[in-house]
């Protein structure tokens, strides 16, 4: 696929996701992971998504970070940081496993699925169901469970980037105004992104991969710039009412690409 077409797809996805999910606190990472996974290996797609997601959260902090609730950020964010380290290390361990599940048909290899693809594919499908099934869409938690929410969302954030939906579910019952919700979500998300990106860099260095060996940089830059534009448009014009269609789009893409990863297509 031509590089220009790849960049266009990434830019469009980042722009729409960042704008439409401005008030939800999740959606950009879950949408960008399957998009990046179409063009780069799945573990590299997780890293590329983290970079775009982190840059986007930093931009939202600049716009709305002053509204963040300090108590919520500490109770949720500190456990999330610790768990993000564990999740990112788990991703590095899985990515370094050279074993593969091989499917043969008539003595011909039709698919090879590595452990990291297996786990990421299953997580994609799992979080797609999280978005699609009404029971999970209505899932909310009391404020006293914030540290538990931080641990869960932080770990999955480090492992696959799927942190926003769980984080929003836990923060929804915290008695926050819309501005405090968006500000707190952005601060916590950025802390997790910064942590996992740091672990990814250390893992790359340990594996002998320099930063210039990361092939997704052009797509990351395009995605981050498009996400900034989407946030500005979303802050000015959009609101939560757009979320049902966004959740459906995210779920369909997650399920489809997750299935493709599990079957060895990508």
Image (cartoon, helix red, strand yellow):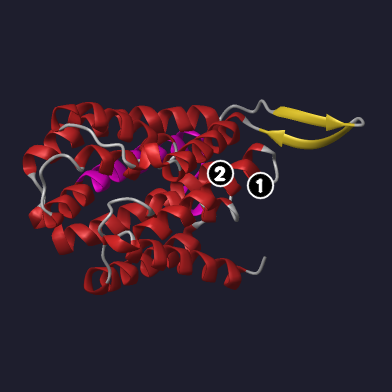
What residue sits right under mark 1 in the picture? Answer: 266
Residue stretch in magenta: 188-212
Q: In the displayed orientation, state which residue is furthest to the front.
A: 134
Residue 257 percent coordinates (x, y): 59, 48
Residue 245 percent coordinates (x, y): 42, 60
Q: Picture quarter containing residue 148?
A: top left
What residue sits right under mark 2 in the picture? Answer: 42
Residue 12 percent coordinates (x, y): 47, 69
Q: Of residues 208 and 116, which is closer to you in this image? A: 116
Q: Earlier in the sequence, mark 1 or mark 2?
A: 2
Which class describes the residues within 10 Å of circle 2: few (<14), some (14-19), or many (20+)? many
Q: Picture quarter containing residue 6?
A: bottom right
71 lies left or right of 220:
left
* Residue in view at x 78 percent, y 30 percent: 103
Vertical arrangement, residue 42 with respect to residue 57, above or below: above
Q: Is residue 198 visible?
A: no
Q: Are marks 1 and 2 in contact (CB under 8 Å)?
A: yes
* Residue in view at x 59 percent, y 27 percent: 97
Q: Is residue 246 magenta?
A: no
Q: Of residues 172 and 124, which is closer to you in this image? A: 172
């Amino acid at each position: 696929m031509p590089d220009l077409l790849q960049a266009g797809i990434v830019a469009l996805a980042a722009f729409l996701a960042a704008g439409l999910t401005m008030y939800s606190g999740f959606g950009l990472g879950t949408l960008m992971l399957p998009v990046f996974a179409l063009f780069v290996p799945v573990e590299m797609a997780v890293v590329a998504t983290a970079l775009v997601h982190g840059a986007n959260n930093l931009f939202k902090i600049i716009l709305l970070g002053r509204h963040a609730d300090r108590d919520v950020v500490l109770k949720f964010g500190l456990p999330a940081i610790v768990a993000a380290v564990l999740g990112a290390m788990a991703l590095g361990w899985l990515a370094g496993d050279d074993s593969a599940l091989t499917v043969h048909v008539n003595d011909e290899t039709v698919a090879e699925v590595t452990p990291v693809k297996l786990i990421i594919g299953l997580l994609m499908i799992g979080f797609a169901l999280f978005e699609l099934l009404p029971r999970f869409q209505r899932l909310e938690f009391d404020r006293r469970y914030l540290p538990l929410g931080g641990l869960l969302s932080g770990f999955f954030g480090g492992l696959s980037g799927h942190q926003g939906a769980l984080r929003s579910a836990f923060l929804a019952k915290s008695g926050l105004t819309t501005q405090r919700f968006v500000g707190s979500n952005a601060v916590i998300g950025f802390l997790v992104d910064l942590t996992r990106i740091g672990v990814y860099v250390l893992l790359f260095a340990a594996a002998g991969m320099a930063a210039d060996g990361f092939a997704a940089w052009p797509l990351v830059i395009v995605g981050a710039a498009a996400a900034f534009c989407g946030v500005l448009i979303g802050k000015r014009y959009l609101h939560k009412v757009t979320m049902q269609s966004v959740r459906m789009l995210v779920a369909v893409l997650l399920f489809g690409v997750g299935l493709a990863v599990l079957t060895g297509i990508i």
